[in-house]
Image: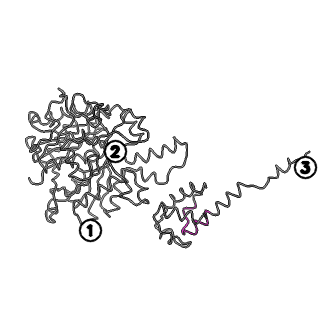
Amino acid sequence: MRRVAVTGIGVVSPLGHSPQDVFEAARLGRSGIRRLDIPSVHRLATPIAATVQFDGAEHFEPPQQRMLDRVSQFAVVAARRAIADAQCELTDTERARTGVFLGTGMGGTLSMDDGYQTLYGQQSDRIKPMLILQGMHNAPAAWIAIEHQLSGPTLTYSTACSSSSVAIGEAWLRVACGALDVAIAGGAEAPLSLGSLKAWEAMHTLASVDVVDPAASCKPFSKNRSGMVLGEGAALVVLEPWDRAQARGAPIYGEIIGYGLTTDAGHITRPSGEGQAAAIRSALTSAGLSVQEVDSINAHGTGTHANDSVETAAIRLVFGERADHIPISATKAVHGHLLGAAGALECVLSLLALRHNVALPTMHLNEPDPQCDLDYVANVARPGAAGQTLMSHSFAFGGTNAVLALRAAGS
Amino acid sequence: MTTVDRIRAMLVKDYKLDANQLTADARLEDLGIDSLGMAELVFNIEDAFGLNVPDVAVTLTTFGEVVAFIDDLIVARDRAATPAVPPAMQALSPGHAP
């Protein structure tokens, strides 16, 4: 297996549009969660989300923009930024050995919602001709491949909240084993349609609005947590063999050293501590790490009652007494739950946390929960605490658990 | 505004084309309008002209053919909207009362 470096980062996120901006926002605990500004907002019990400041017209000519759902626009812009960031000029031969690996949970759900509004709301049969292209889950990955002429595999993963960790993990495997020379990997999500928001509300998984500060509504690991807050955006990374990156003098953000993937095979939503623990152990084995060698964790930490207590138990199960000494960050408190893009944004934040050796804070954690009794780096970033090796957790509805093992570039 | 002007204006606005390119013999393919673009154009023409364009429209190959095709549809529609008095109505006219 070859070592794999991350040499480019591209983000379109509620925390900002550059690696520096998202890291600074997460470090300072500046929340990207705000009141939603959509036409039917009065119909929402939880009218908040982590939204992205984004105007597609600044990035696309009208004929192309009309074919792209917001999720594809996010993905294509994030890919441009990641590839530019990697300063990666690809030859024709290398393009054939470059793949795109993209996670999305809900694909072009905004466009589909619009189509259904025409069909059922207006009782009209005039569905726009581009709807299939806008709605299909593999559109974001396909557009990235088209724009950059990447003719290796173009794969889309849809495993709900772990989609983009799976995408990065699967890309890592292919680059590590030599099947590919370069991979563009990550996730994109644009789930803030009325239909999607109401469906999430109906599941009773969303946080109630913090009346004092709506931006603080997501409270992972806090006893007063009430659920997750949806977010939108995209995060993509460029992966390439370590030797190749060094040979061309590329900036290296960090290294992906392992990947664990398991399935609960239990309940469709209720998380399993055993299943999560199995994924963490699998990532440790993949990376050749002992539990003593893990310096920090980016938790799945959604802010739901079930996830945060079960994840805590899973970490205890794997790390035993060592668990008390591992700083754990739950950054969804500030960027919300980007579903199929969550793992990728958290992978980016984790790489930056390692690079700066700062454990990112878990914001809005103001009531300790006896069931969540680990060190969550509550409310204030901790310089010097991210260490050299970090595990990034993503656990999903459907039971697909993905864990990425990351290492700082300098180590 | 004539049909050709209206369709030309749509292509300039929505497809960012140069009006001078839009001559009668300009091939849609050369203008960057593929079958998908044509499906979208037909949709927009239906809205703008209040027409129901049959599926065969997507096989047209030049700008001139599109304009002529739409003109024919407009003529057919207008003819259908102002029919001659049908024979059955004539039979009911006062001069022919039984």
Label 1 sits on residue: A93
Q: CA distance from mark 1 to mark 3?
A: 87 Å
The residue indicated by pointer 2 is A105
Q: Position of residue A26 (x, y in %)?
A: 21, 44
Q: Quadrant of residue A78?
A: bottom left
Residue that carries the numbered disc 3 in the rendered image: B95
Residue B28 is inside the magenta segment: no
Check if residue B57 falls in the magenta segment: yes
Percent across and percent down for residue B10 are 52, 61
- For the point 18% across and 30% down, the residue is A372
Q: Are tags 1 and 3 found on a single chain?
A: no
Q: Position of residue A369 (x, y in %)?
A: 19, 27
Query: Residue B86's x, y, as percent?
Result: 80, 52
- Label 2, label 1: how many angstroms apart (C-alpha)? 32 Å
Same chain for labels 2 and 1? Say yes or no. Answer: yes
Give the magenta range: B56-70
Q: Residues within 10 Å of mark 3 (few under 14, many from 20)?
A: few
How many other residues sit within 10 Å of disc 1, few (<14), some (14-19) or many (≥20)?
few
Q: Chain of mark 2?
A: A
Q: Is residue A158 above or below residue A312?
A: below
Question: Tag 3, which chain?
Answer: B
In the displayed structure, A92 sits above or below A367; it is: below
> In the image, is residue A47 above or below residue A100?
above
- Mark 1 and mark 3 residues within 8 Å of each other at the beta carbon: no
Q: Amino acid at mark 2?
A: Gly
Q: Secondary structure at mark 1?
A: helix
Query: What is the three-letter code of the residue carrying label 3?
Result: Gly
